Image (cartoon, rainbow, N blue to C red):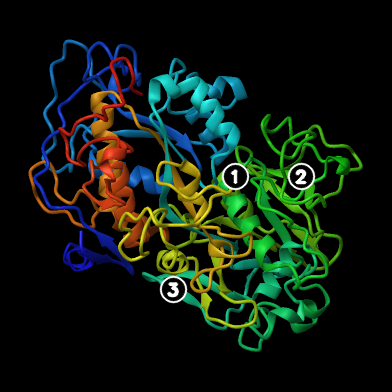
């Protein structure tokens, strides 16, 4: 497809150019019930059991918490008429307002690492890891999809090949959302002796859609100093210059004397579980902080914060697969930045980890100085709850809350899934120069926009080109058949690409779709339908009414970006259609990387998916 034609078939959603597939009438995907079975019946969908004897045609998935609410909103809009179906009850009637009435997806968020673990497995991994499962039947064996904010590993792929290769076909892995990681804080930093709230003074406050979302300005020097534990109080003079030359003190309800003496001790908040958001965050700090602080404690990206088991900190009792335990796997550094306390969401309280040594370091401040260690918690909802927890640190005649942490931007105040009590900082793009950006969809897409998809000639078009000479992590030339390539082109070196973008929001990553080449027929039609609405390959509902951009607008409302135009085009042509794009004398479709021959219902399965295969 020519670039001129691509432009004619494109539209703007927010600040992102979304390529549209050739407009064709979509048809109704027929109703199907019961557990997936590639043999009998051939058109069954995957089933859960919401009540005794009932079946629900639903795609099952798990993984990161970062996009959980966005995904549910998209699924609800595509098909929200999904009643429990009882054998013998007959086929229910489709709701005319749905984009695809019998579509449903069920998502149990855990973290990125667990999403990959369940994706590569044929058996229920919640029982293996002793994790609570609120949405799936205990008899659920496998999922149809997952999401991860971090990359798959060699172990993931080798396990996949052994366990699922003969059933699921080839693994499918590519970015689907652009994810800014917010540096979040509570706007209320304390309560004074008269019981009045004390709020940070923000020189350039930001509102989005009428909602106050913060705007405390943090330079690289500031956020590198804060999260390395070097800057320990919000009264530090380093905050003054970026924030209009004034301090962050509430001049109405706080006194300059109290502020100068005690300020607000900084308390770091991070993740206890193995989180892709931690991976994005630590990758940025590894790339951006060296040379700005005396010692950068972040030496590599990882799903676990910098940690040492010699510290006595051990959270194995709180989460069996945590990285914050002896032999817990790779951490982002070997200098311990984690305290022994965690925020427990069910009880809304701070507790000491059961298996940590009595002498293990604390995350609590000492006097007017923060400890420089993280208070940890489970999931994005845990980070939200911990940061917005009522002021609880007594210092002098004030009760203070100086918690600051990293979290998906979908949780800040203006988002449908956010909290008015969670504000975000504006971060400067460059180390010493550049604009200050909020963690918004437009700023995240700006950070990613100049990166070209694998085997593509241009970031604008994403057209297929076998002449791409870039390398993946293993030194192999990038290839669309290689799952690593879709991720590795985002990070050409440890300090370039999204690790340290030249423009836009500086702590930006992507959320990757985890899928399979082979599905049972109804599951295949539904998974391609979900992906097609997000990439822009599908624009019309089952009655052929135009809904261009409607599903793509949902992430932006939660500060999460849609893929740039070239990426959406490359993914559609590679995985959602039998593409006729040609390079080097070979059509892309002939490589058999696609899940379905067309994004629209009724498309055929890949010829490599033989009888008996399908998820």
What residue is shown with label 2? 341
Residue ID at (41%, 64%)? 441
Q: Would residue 328 appear left or right of 441 to someone viewing this image?
A: right
Q: Measured from the top left, where is residue 467 in percent x and y?
A: 39, 57
Q: Earlier in the sequence, mark 1 or mark 3?
A: 3
- In space, the residues marked 1 and 3 are separated at their CA atoms by 29 Å
What residue is shown with label 1? 275
Q: Measured from the top left, where is residue 27 in percent x and y?
A: 10, 38
Residue ID at (64%, 40%)? 273
What residue is shown with label 3? 207
Q: Measured from the top left, where is residue 383 in percent x and y?
A: 60, 50
Q: Earlier in the sequence, mark 2 or mark 3?
A: 3
Residue ID at (16%, 36%)? 601
Q: Earlier in the sequence, mark 2 or mark 1?
A: 1
Q: Residues within 10 Å of mark 3 (few under 14, many from 20)?
A: few
Q: Would residue 90 appear left or right of 51 to someone viewing this image?
A: left
- In space, the residues marked 2 and 1 are separated at their CA atoms by 18 Å
């Amino acid at each position: 497809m020519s670039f001129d034609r691509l432009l004619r078939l494109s539209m703007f959603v927010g600040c992102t150019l979304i390529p549209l597939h050739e407009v064709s009438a979509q048809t109704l995907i027929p109703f199907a019930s019961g557990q997936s079975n590639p043999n009998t019946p051939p058109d069954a969908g995957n089933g859960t059991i919401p009540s005794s004897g009932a079946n629900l045609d639903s795609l099952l998935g798990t993984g990161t918490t970062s996009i959980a609410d966005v995904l549910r909103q998209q699924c609800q809009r595509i098909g929200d008429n999904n009643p429990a179906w009882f054998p013998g009850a007959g086929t229910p009637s489709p709701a005319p307002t749905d984009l695809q009435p019998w579509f449903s997806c069920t998502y149990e968020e855990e973290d990125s690492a667990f999403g990959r673990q369940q994706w590569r497995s044929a058996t229920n991994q919640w029982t293996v890891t002793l994790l609570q499962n609120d949405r799936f039947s205990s008899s659920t064996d496998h999922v149809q999809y997952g999401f991860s904010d971090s990359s798959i590993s060699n172990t993931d792929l080798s396990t996949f090949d052994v366990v699922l290769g003969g059933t699921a076909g080839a693994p499918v892995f590519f970015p689907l959302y652009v994810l800014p990681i917010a540096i979040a804080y509570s706007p209320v930093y304390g309560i004074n002796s008269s019981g009045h709230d004390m709020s940070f003074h923000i020189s350039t406050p930001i509102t989005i859609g009428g909602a106050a979302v913060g705007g405390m300005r943090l330079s690289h020097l500031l956020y590198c100093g804060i999260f390395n534990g070097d800057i320990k109080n919000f009264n530090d003079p380093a905050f003054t210059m970026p924030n209009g030359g004034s301090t962050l003190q509430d001049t109405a309800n706080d006194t300059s004397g109290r502020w100068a003496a005690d300020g607000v001790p900084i308390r770091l908040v991070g993740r206890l579980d193995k989180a892709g958001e931690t991976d994005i965050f630590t990758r940025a700090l590894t790339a951006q902080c060296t040379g700005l602080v005396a010692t950068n404690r972040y030496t590599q990206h990882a799903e676990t914060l910098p940690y040492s088991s010699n510290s006595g900190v051990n959270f194995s009792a709180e989460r069996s697969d945590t990285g914050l335990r002896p032999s817990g796997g790779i951490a982002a550094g070997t200098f311990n930045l984690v305290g022994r306390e965690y925020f427990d969401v069910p009880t809304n309280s701070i507790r000491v980890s059961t298996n940590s040594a009595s002498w293990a370091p604390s995350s609590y401040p000492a006097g007017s100085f923060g400890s420089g260690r993280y208070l940890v918690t489970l999931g994005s909802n845990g980070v939200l709850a911990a940061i917005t927890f009522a002021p609880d640190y007594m210092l002098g005649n004030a009760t203070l809350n100086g918690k600051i942490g990293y979290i998906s931007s979908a949780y800040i105040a203006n988002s449908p899934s956010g909290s008015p009590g969670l504000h975000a900082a504006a971060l400067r793009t460059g180390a010493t120069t550049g604009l200050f950006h909020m963690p918004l969809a437009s700023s995240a897409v700006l950070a990613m926009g100049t990166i070209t998809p694998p085997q593509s000639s241009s970031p604008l078009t994403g057209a297929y080109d076998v002449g791409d000479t870039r390398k993946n992590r293993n030194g192999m030339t990038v290839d669309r058949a290689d799952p690593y390539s879709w991720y590795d082109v985002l990070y050409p070196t440890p300090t370039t690409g999204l690790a340290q973008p030249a423009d836009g929001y500086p702590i930006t990553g992507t959320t990757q779709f985890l899928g399979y080449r082979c599905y049972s027929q109804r599951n295949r039609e539904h998974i391609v339908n979900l992906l097609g609405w997000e990439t822009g390959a599908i624009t019309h509902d089952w009655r052929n009414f135009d809904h261009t951009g409607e599903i793509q607008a949902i992430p932006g409302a939660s500060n999460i970006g849609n893929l740039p135009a070239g990426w959406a085009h490359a993914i559609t042509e590679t995985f959602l259609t039998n593409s006729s794009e040609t390079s080097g004398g070979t059509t892309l479709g002939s490589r058999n990387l696609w899940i379905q021959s067309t994004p629209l219902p009724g498309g055929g399965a890949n010829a490599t998916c033989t009888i008996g295969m399908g998820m």
